[in-house]
Image (spheres, rainbow, N blue to C red):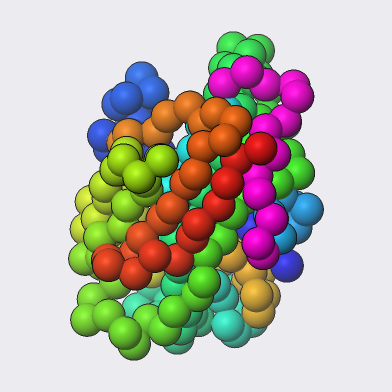
């Protein structure tokens, strides 16, 4: 199982981090060890003083595929959720300044939280889904998949042109604006429409 993540897929988020809006998807990956186990907290890593939450729609692949055309992409997933791409922002800034890869800032142990998966069939249109993140009960991020630069099906077409997608692979589809720092004893909750799919403490 692999975790494929998409960076800068919401124009406002790219702008808030002073990045250019991309002309094609920006991809990076996390290993399976990045996943936080169910009912476990997120432990702040000791190598960073500025870890940020990034709420995202997550798609689970249910069928082996390579070079998938966008018009057929919907056949390769039937479950979605929300998740958090934790990012060591200070480490990322150092790496970017040196032109180095982001893995230490993005793919460390425990850097990915995934909520309960729900059926795509529960929603009329996944290209118009609201999702949100609350930090200690206060809404910090509000997103809608209609604001994605690259839709889920376009992402699957693009990703599968480079990487064979296998059953169980996860695609983190990018975060909207509003990212921010997490602190010890924070509680984070994520919602897809009105459904709370993630509840996690920070230690």
Report whether 65 appears left or right of 147.
right
Magenta stretch, overall SS:
loop
Quadrant housing residue 178: top left
197 vs 114, left or right, is left
Above-or-below relation of 165 to 77:
above
Q: Could you say which is closer to the camera, residue 93 or residue 153?
A: 93
Image x and y of residue 102, in percent: 65, 31
> What residue is drawn where x is 60% and y is 78%?
65
The C terminus: image quadrant: top right
The quadrant of the image that shows the N terminus is: bottom right
The answer to whether residue 60 is seen in the rendering is yes
**Hey, which quadrant is residue 166 in on the image?**
bottom right
Residue 19 position within the rendered picture, expressed as x and y whole percent measured from the top left: 38, 24
Tell me: 52 left or right of 63.
left
Counting from the top left corner in percent of width and height, residue 186 is at 51, 37
At x 40%, y 40%, the residue is 135
**Closer to the camera in the image, 183 or 121:** 183
Q: Nearer the viewer, residue 149 or 68?
A: 149
The magenta segment: 38-50
Q: Is residue 49 magenta?
A: yes
């Amino acid at each position: 199982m692999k975790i494929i993540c998409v960076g800068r897929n919401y124009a406002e988020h790219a702008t808030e981090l002073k990045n250019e809006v991309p002309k094609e998807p920006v991809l990076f990956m996390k290993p399976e060890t990045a996943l936080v186990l169910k009912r476990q907290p997120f432990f702040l890593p000791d190598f960073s003083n500025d870890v940020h939450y990034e709420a995202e729609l997550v798609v689970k692949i249910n069928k082996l595929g390579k070079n998938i055309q966008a018009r057929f992409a919907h056949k390769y997933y039937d479950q979605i959720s929300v998740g958090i791409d934790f990012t060591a922002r200070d480490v990322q800034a150092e790496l970017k300044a040196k032109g180095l890869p982001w893995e230490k800032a993005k793919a460390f142990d425990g850097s990915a939280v995934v909520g309960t998966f729900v059926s795509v069939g529960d929603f009329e249109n996944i290209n118009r889904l609201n999702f949100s993140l609350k930090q200690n009960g206060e809404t910090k991020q509000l997103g809608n998949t209609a604001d994605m630069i690259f839709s889920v099906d376009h992402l699957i077409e693009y990703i599968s042109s480079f990487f064979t997608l296998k059953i169980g692979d996860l695609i983190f589809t990018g975060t909207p604006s509003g990212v921010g720092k997490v602190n010890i004893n924070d509680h984070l909750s994520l919602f897809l429409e009105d459904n709370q799919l993630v509840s996690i403490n920070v230690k």
